[in-house]
Image (cartoon, rainbow, N blue to C red):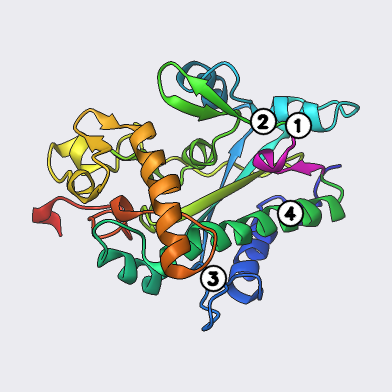
Amino acid sequence: MSANISDQSGSWITLLIEDFIANSPENTLQNLAQDRAFENPLIGFSNGADPLFERYKEVVGPYHWTPKEIFDLTFPETQVQSGDLTVISWILPQTELTKRDNRKETVYPSERWARARVFGEEVNVKLRRAMVSALESKGNLAVAPVLSPLWERKPSDRFILASTWSERHAAYAAGLGTFGVCDGLITPRGKAMRCGSVVAAVAIPPTPRPYLHHRAYCLYYTRGICGKCISRCPAGALSRFGHDKIKCREHVRTIGGKYVKSHYGFDGFGCGLCQTKVPCESRVPLRPDED
């Protein structure tokens, strides 16, 4: 069940993910131009015994799985320790075309953005399955937590909406980014992205976390400046107090869904205005005097 010695660095996993996004015909927005859904990804690793995963039970909710919990639920006859597991996380940056289109919008998502939300997530699902298959072909049992039939959304007294596994929290643990006002993950490739993860019985050194706080990359929280995502939100769901998930969901799913269907001709939804035309769209932002 262990990886070969030559695989210990995880470079083969990084190459597989990069190759899928660079070369797979699945990486498409499914429009007439067959535009790519995502640009070159970022990949990081965290160990299943990382204390953050236990901390998430306090921060997110007691129902949030540790890597060992979802692994044990998936493979009940296999005995592993938390430290035997690695969480493989990735960031899929939106393309420049998709970001450019969405910058122009003030109320509804651009067509490319809506396609990235629906068909792009299909790409992400296929990537998760491809990674599970690739790992298991090498003898490493693996599960994509959000594809598990046991995964579910949960009501939260603190956050209103939560789930049994958060892709963004997995990415944070893997050193790939920190959270902003809108709860989006600000990464070295920016906040305009989607993310995914797989839990595997494979030994890979964890990626260092280059930050000490979960808000470290957000100018509003760290410097008291910016807040441009607040004014970009057409639903009034963002404020200095944070993110109103109910208002956000209503705009993204219901209002955005009706607009996408009537204007773009497919069943979809989206918004993403807080992720575009902001300093953290495509990078970790700097102070104005450092720009």
Circle nearer the viewer, 3 or 2:
3
User: Is residue 117 covered in magenta?
Assistant: no
Q: Quadrant of the C terminus?
A: bottom left
Residue shown at the point (63%, 31%) measured from the top left: 152
Q: Mark 2 Cα within 10 Å, few/some/many (few <14, many 20+)?
A: many
Q: Name the residue beneath numbered marker 1.
A: 71
* Residue 100 locus on image (x, y percent): 31, 71
Q: Nearer the viewer, mark 1 or mark 4?
A: 4
Q: Secondary structure at mark 3?
A: loop
Picture coordinates of residue 105 (x, y %)?
27, 63
The alpha-carbon separation of the residues under discs 1 and 4 comes to: 15 Å
The residue at the far left in this view is: 289
Which residue position holds label 3? 29
Instruction: Tell me the residue at 65%/31% (across/down).
Output: 48
Q: Is residue 78 left or right of residue 173?
A: right
Q: Amino acid at mark 2?
A: Pro
Residue 67's disc is 2
Instruction: Give the mark, 3 or 1, whose residue is nearer the N terminus.
Output: 3
Contact, CB < 8 Å: mark 1 with mark 2? yes
In the image, the segment drawn in magenta is 141-149
The front one of 146 and 169 is 146
List x then y, in percent, for residue 30: 57, 73
Q: Is residue 94 visible from the viewing direction of this image? A: no
Classed neighbour count for the residue bearing mark 3: other residues with Cα under 10 Å, few (<14), some (14–19), many (≥20)? many
How would you rate the neighbour count of disc 4 (Cα within 10 Å): few for under 14, some for 14-19, many for 20 or more? some
Distance in Å between CA atoms under marks 3 and 2? 31 Å
Identify the residue at horizontal 51%, vertical 57% (top origin). Answer: 268
Which is closer to the viewer, label 3 or label 1? 3
Q: Mark 4 and mark 2: span between their CA atoms?
A: 17 Å
Mark 4 vs 2, N-terminal side = 2
Q: Which residue is mark 4?
A: 129
- Give SS at disc 4: helix
